[in-house]
Amino acid sequence: MTNEMSELGARELAASPADILSKASEAAKVLKQMITQTKSSVKIGTNEHIKQEGWQTIGSIYHVTARTKSVEPCEINGISGAHAIVDLIDDYSGNVIGSGQSFCMRDEANRKTQPWFQIASMAQTRASSRAFANKFRWITVMAGYAPTPAEEMEGAEITPAKVGKDLESRIEDAKRILIADGMRSQDVEGAIKDKNPEDSFGILKDLYLKMIKEKQNAN
């Protein structure tokens, strides 16, 4: 066993598949109880998305803590914002066992005039949730929740009730979410090519719900 191997990794290797699933099942039950009691999820469409405190709870169960690696200003296609990277740390060894990165951009709904620290804070929050999701999303699915963190859905709730004068902004948010969740940008753009905004929004919503269903079936 090398020094680089984390205590968490060593414990996972030592445990049998049955033990791993047994602990995961127990963790999923505890997580669901906590989320129900604290209302730490957001319903978007037919799915419940877990807020950051829910992801932190999973980390606590497995003795894993999020640590911010960097938060920097960025610019994409002329739009300014913040880019954050967060590492997951094994509480026993102090080793990095995972990571996540995310953005918060000023073209998102209600972000245009926000001070920098709020933009940076949201990028960091999203990166933290994504880091936990990258490692533990299969447990959230066992608990009955969507695998995408709620923070990544902020400002882009894909539901007709949210469609209004800022439709174009919400379309951009929805596209960003699909790409962040693994869909190729060219596929996203191709799906709504030459479509009007209303049709584009509906197509993106259907693509998102289809992606969530496929991930739930895969787990």
Image (cartoon, helix red, strand yellow):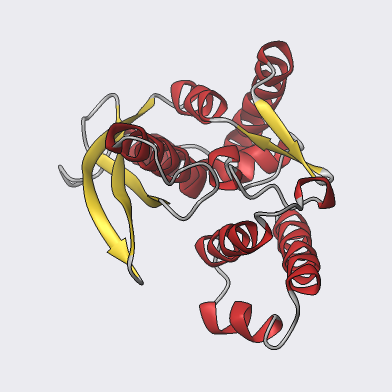
Q: Residue at x 34, y 47 (%)?
A: 99
Q: Position of residue 105 (x, y in %)?
A: 40, 52
Residue lying at the far top of the rendered structure: 37
Q: Position of residue 18 (x, y in %)?
A: 64, 39
Location of residue 189 by image quarter: bottom right
Q: Position of residue 140 (x, y in %)?
A: 65, 38
217 is higher (above) or lower (below) than 197: above
Nearest the viewer among 97 and 127 is: 127
Q: Residue at x 29, y 25 (%)?
A: 91
Q: In which quadrant of the rendered image does the C terminus lie?
A: bottom right
Q: In which quadrant of the rendered image does the N terminus lie?
A: top left
Q: Residue at x 63, y 33 (%)?
A: 50
State the count of labels.
0
Left/right of residue 162 with respect to residue 136 in the rendered view? right
Left/right of residue 122 with respect to residue 115 in the rendered view? right
Nearest the viewer among 16 and 204 is: 204
202 is higher (above) or lower (below) than 52: below
Left/right of residue 43 with respect to residue 193 in the rendered view? right
Residue lying at the far left of the rendered structure: 3
Nearest the viewer among 211 and 90 is: 211
Q: Residue at x 54, y 77 (%)?
A: 184
Location of residue 11 by image quarter: top left
Left/right of residue 174 with respect to residue 11 in the rendered view? right
39 is higher (above) or lower (below) than 176: above
Q: Position of residue 25 (x, y in %)?
A: 69, 31
